[in-house]
Image (tube, helix red, strand yellow):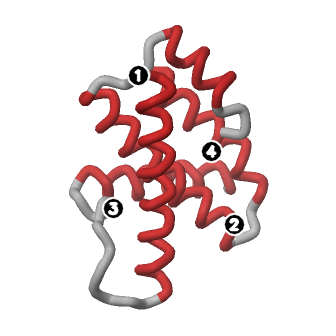
Amino acid sequence: MKRLWGIALTGMLLASCATGGGLTTGGGGGGQASSQTSSAEAQARDLTNRMKTVLSLDKTQEEKVLTINVVNQKLLQRIRENNDQGLAASTKENYHKELKAVLSTDQFSKFRTSFPGL
């Protein structure tokens, strides 16, 4: 059941990002959910900027990695909010799978050594 929920949550977040719903620039609202979303997005942007530098991402890779990072940060945020560490391993596995599809073999290898906690 947890795995199905995780897959459904991943799909919802991917759909949200694909339609522009997940990549807000902050501002407005000011509610807790809005600030948490902004925080997840800010973390994703910071991470993507570091990855861009360390992995020498091209523009296309950078855009794809940003989307992957936003979705992953939001998933991790929800896992923390729901205290559901059972989903953390599968989330990390899916994150690596998605990155592997965007990065070259050398870039992914460098990602694994340069960002060991991810």
User: Whole-percent x and y of residue 83?
Assistant: 75, 68
In the drawing, what numbered circle is on residue 80?
A: 2
Report helix, strand or loop for mark 1: loop
Residue ID at (72%, 39%): 117
Q: How busy is the neighbourhood of tag 1: few (under 14 within 10 Å), some, or many (20 plus)?
A: few
Report helix, strand or loop for mark 2: helix
Q: How busy is the neighbourhood of tag 2: few (under 14 within 10 Å), some, or many (20 plus)?
A: few
Residue placed under numbered mark 1 in the picture = 56
Do labels 1 and 2 touch, CB within 8 Å? no
Do labels 2 and 3 touch, CB within 8 Å? no
Task: Name the residue type under label 1.
Answer: Ser
Residue placed under numbered mark 3 in the picture = 22
Q: Residue 79 or 46: which is nearer the viewer? A: 46
Do labels 3 and 1 touch, CB within 8 Å? no
Residue placed under numbered mark 4 in the picture = 91
Q: Of marks 1 and 4, which one's residue comes earlier in the chain?
A: 1
User: Whole-percent x and y of residue 38?
Assistant: 42, 70
Q: Of marks 2 and 3, which one's residue comes earlier in the chain?
A: 3
Which residue is outermost to the front?
Answer: 53
Q: Quadrant of the C terminus?
A: top right
Residue 35 occupies which quadrant of the picture? bottom left
- Whole-angstrom CA distance, mark 1 to mark 4, is 25 Å
For marks 1 and 4, give the one nearer the viewer: 1
- Whole-angstrom CA distance, mark 2 to mark 3, is 18 Å
Residue ID at (58%, 30%): 96
Q: Of marks 4 and 3, which one's residue comes earlier in the chain?
A: 3
Report helix, strand or loop for mark 3: loop
Task: Name the residue type under label 4.
Answer: Thr
Q: How busy is the neighbourhood of tag 3: few (under 14 within 10 Å), some, or many (20 plus)?
A: many
Residue ID at (77%, 57%): 85
Q: Of marks 1 and 2, which one's residue comes earlier in the chain?
A: 1
- Whole-angstrom CA distance, mark 4 to mark 3, is 18 Å
